[in-house]
C-alpha cells in the first residue's frame, strides 16, 4: 500500500524547485508543494484507518504514512527520545528540496483565529498547541509570540495568521503560504480523520502540523532527511528513505516524527538565523 501510494503521490519537479526566483512567490509555491505531502498522508491515513484499527504513522512534511509492520516489536522509545534530544555531527541533512534562507526579523508574531475550527477543538486547546510550538521554536534564538484574534477583529498587519480554511489549506492538513504570511489548517481533513477514527489523538496531529509549518516561516524551506525531525519527509519519492539511528525502527511506531522541533531542527534554525 505504501509503495503504491508513494508512486501515486505528487512530486516536486526540479523545475518547480529551481525555476522560480527566491521571492515570496517562490516560498509560497514551495510550501504548497511541500504540503501536498499532507494530502498524501491524509489519503493514506484515512484508507488505512478505514481498513483496520491498527496503529498508524506518517512522514514527510507531514508525510507519508507508514503502518507498523505486522509482528514487529516496537522500537525502544529511548532511541527516538535520544534522537529528539540530541543532534549528532553529520545528522543535520536535508533532502535538498528547498532553499533555506534566514528570516528578516528576529521576532515573529503569530495571530491565531479560531473561526471555522472543528467543534471538537476548543480555542484554548489550539492556542495552547500553537503557543507550545512557538515556544519550542524559540530555542532557535528568535522571539516568537502568539496572540488570539477574536471574531470580527482584524489581526495586526505584521502578524502571521494561523487560520482554519479549506481554501487556504487546499484540502490538506495545513499549508504554509510564506509569501502571504498565512498558515492555513484544513478543517475538512481533520473532520475526515475524526470520522474515520475518533480515537486518534488529533491534537498530536495538529501539534505536528503546526510545528512543521511554523518551521517554514523560520526560513527552513528544505525538508530534513532525519525521520524524527519535525521538518522531515520520510522519503524523497525516489525510493530513498529518511535516516534512523536504529534502522529496525522503521515501521515500528505510529509516528516517528516529533510533534515539536528536535535538536537537529533547532540547530539548523540557529545556523540559518544566527
Ligand atoms: Zn513542509
Image (cartoon, grey):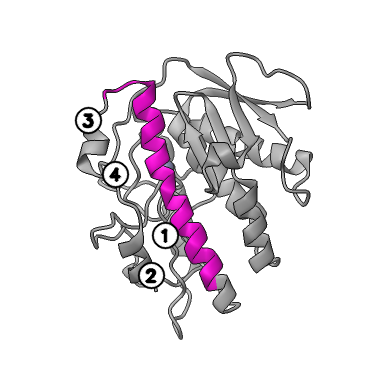
Which mark is in front, 3 or 2? 3
Verify CB contact (< 8 Å) between mark 4 and mark 3.
no
Which mark is in front, 2 or 4? 2
Instruction: Tell me residue 107's x, y (percent).
Output: 53, 18
What is the CA distance from the residue labelled 4 to the residue labelled 3? 20 Å
Q: Name the residue under label 2.
A: 2
Q: Does the magenta stretch include residue 43?
A: yes
Q: Name the residue under label 1.
A: 64
Looking at the picture, tell me which residue is in the foreground, 200 or 145: 200
Instruction: Tell me residue 155's x, y (percent).
Output: 67, 19
Q: Mark 3 points at which residue?
A: 19
Q: Which of marks 2 and 1 is nearer the N terminus?
A: 2
The yes-or-no answer for disc 3 within 8 Å of ligand 1 is no
Image quadrant in which the C terminus is located: top left
Q: Residues within 10 Å of mark 4 (few under 14, many from 20)?
A: some
Is residue 31 in view?
Answer: yes
Badge 1 marks a residue whose secondary structure is loop
What is the CA distance from the residue labelled 2 to the residue labelled 4? 22 Å
Badge 4 marks a residue whose secondary structure is loop
Q: Mark 4 points at which residue?
A: 94
Q: Report the side of 161 relative to 84 (left or right).
A: right
Instruction: Tell me residue 59's x, y (percent).
Output: 43, 57
Badge 3 marks a residue whose secondary structure is loop
Q: Report the side of 203 relative to 238 (left or right).
A: right
Q: Earlier in the sequence, mark 4 or mark 3?
A: 3
Instruction: Tell me residue 137's x, y (percent).
Output: 52, 34
Badge 2 marks a residue whose secondary structure is helix
Amino acid at each position: 500500500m505504501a509503495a503504491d501510494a508513494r508512486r501515486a503521490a505528487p512530486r516536486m519537479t526540479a523545475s518547480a524547485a529551481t525555476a522560480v526566483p527566491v521571492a515570496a512567490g517562490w516560498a509560497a509555491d514551495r510550501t504548497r508543494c511541500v504540503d501536498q505531502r499532507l494530502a498524501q498522508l491524509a489519503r493514506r491515513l484515512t484508507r488505512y484507518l478505514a481498513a483496520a484499527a491498527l496503529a498508524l504513522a506518517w512522514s514527510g512534511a507531514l508525510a507519508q504514512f507508514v503502518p507498523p509492520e505486522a509482528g514487529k516489536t516496537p522500537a525502544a522509545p529511548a532511541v527516538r527520545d535520544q534522537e529528539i534530544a540530541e543532534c549528532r555531527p553529520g545528522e543535520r541533512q536535508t533532502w535538498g528540496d528547498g532553499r533555506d534562507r534566514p528570516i528578516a526579523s528576529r521576532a515573529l508574531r503569530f495571530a491565531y483565529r479560531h473561526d471555522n475550527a472543528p467543534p471538537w477543538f476548543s480555542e484554548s486547546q489550539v492556542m495552547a498547541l500553537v503557543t507550545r510550538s512557538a515556544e519550542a521554536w524559540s530555542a532557535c534564538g528568535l522571539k516568537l509570540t502568539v496572540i488570539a484574534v477574536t471574531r470580527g477583529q482584524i489581526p495586526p498587519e505584521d502578524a502571521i495568521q494561523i487560520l482554519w480554511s479549506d481554501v487556504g489549506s487546499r484540502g490538506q492538513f495545513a499549508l504554509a503560504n510564506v509569501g502571504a504570511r498565512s498558515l492555513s489548517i484544513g478543517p475538512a481533513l481533520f473532520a475526515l480523520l475524526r470520522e474515520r477514527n475518533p480515537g486518534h489523538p488529533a491534537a498530536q496531529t495538529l501539534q505536528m502540523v503546526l510545528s512543521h509549518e511554523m518551521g517554514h516561516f523560520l526560513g527552513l524551506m528544505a525538508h530534513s532527511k532525519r525521520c524524527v525531525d519535525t521538518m522531515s519527509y520520510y522519503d524523497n519519492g525516489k525510493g530513498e528513505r529518511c535516516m534512523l539511528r536504529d534502522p529496525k525502527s522503521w515501521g515500528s511506531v505510529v509516528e516517528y516524527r516529533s510533534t515539536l522541533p528536535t535538536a537537529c531542527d533547532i540547530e539548523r534554525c540557529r545556523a540559518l538565523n544566527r
